């Protein structure tokens, strides 16, 4: 009987603190397709402000590989472990990866933050206009700004993005 190879899927590696970029470069160097979503933030030092590129997900780097390749991919001193759910390497669905890419491309400086707690209440909304059109999430209010929490179920976290209220609409419910 012929063995069928399972397709490559997006998996998540947990890195040492502040080692995401080195882990990403190591994966690329090994020939893997890797992804490190980043955002520009403004950092304040005593004498100046500076724009710096920081990973959107602290200590996470994404790699496209088969399950039997993940151990080889994770074999680097910058990587602590493979992120697992229920004992198996976590898989991030392509739909979620597309959403992360869209958010990364559409956010401006200091507009997004990742939080690792689920939201208890809030209205489901969809972004109806602007660069993030089509993203769905839960509306929350922080510091008087309209922010949308977009859940990344495969990672068990949310991305909070600020969206002007004129772009928000109610999420239609399937009938």
Image: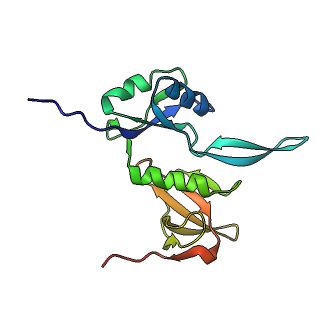
Figure quadrant of the N terminus: top left
Residue at the (38%, 49%) spot, across then down? 93
Q: Residue furthest left?
A: 1
> Could you tell me if residue 153 is visible in this image?
no
**Left or right of 156 in this view: 167:** right
Is 24 situated above or below 93? above
Is 31 situated above or below 137? above
Q: Quadrant of residue 160?
A: bottom right
Q: Quadrant of residue 159?
A: bottom right
The image shows residue 74 at horizontal and vertical percentages of 44, 26
**Left or right of 12 in this view: 50:** right
The image shows residue 69 at horizontal and vertical percentages of 35, 27
> Could you tell me if residue 85 is visible in this image?
yes
Viewer-side residue, 92 vs 44: 92
Residue at the (56%, 28%) spot, across then down? 25
Is 118 situated above or below 138? above
Residue at the (70%, 71%) spot, across then down? 144
The image shows residue 81 at horizontal and vertical percentages of 45, 29
The image shows residue 168 at horizontal and vertical percentages of 56, 74
Residue at the (60%, 68%) spot, across then down? 130
Total residue callouts: 0
Q: How is the image coloured?
A: rainbow
Figure quadrant of the C terminus: bottom left
């Amino acid at each position: 009987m012929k063995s069928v190879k399972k397709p490559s899927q997006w998996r998540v590696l947990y890195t040492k603190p502040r080692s995401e970029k080195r882990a990403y470069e190591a994966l690329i160097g090994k020939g893997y397709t890797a992804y490190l979503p980043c955002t520009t933030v403004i950092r304040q030092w005593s004498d100046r402000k500076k724009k710096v590129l920081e990973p959107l997900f602290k200590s996470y780097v994404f790699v496209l590989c088969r399950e039997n390749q993940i151990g080889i991919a994770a074999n680097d001193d910058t990587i602590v472990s493979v992120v697992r759910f229920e004992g198996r390497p976590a898989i991030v669905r392509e739909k979620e990866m597309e959403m992360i890419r869209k958010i990364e491309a559409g956010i401006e400086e200091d507009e997004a933050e990742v939080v690792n707690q689920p939201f208890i209440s809030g209205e489901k909304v969809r972004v109806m206009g602007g660069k993030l059109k089509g993203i769905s999430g839960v509306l929350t209010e922080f510091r008087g700004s309209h922010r949308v929490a977009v859940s990344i179920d495969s990672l068990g976290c949310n991305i909070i993005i600020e969206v002007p209220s004129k772009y928000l609409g109610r999420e239609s419910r399937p009938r």
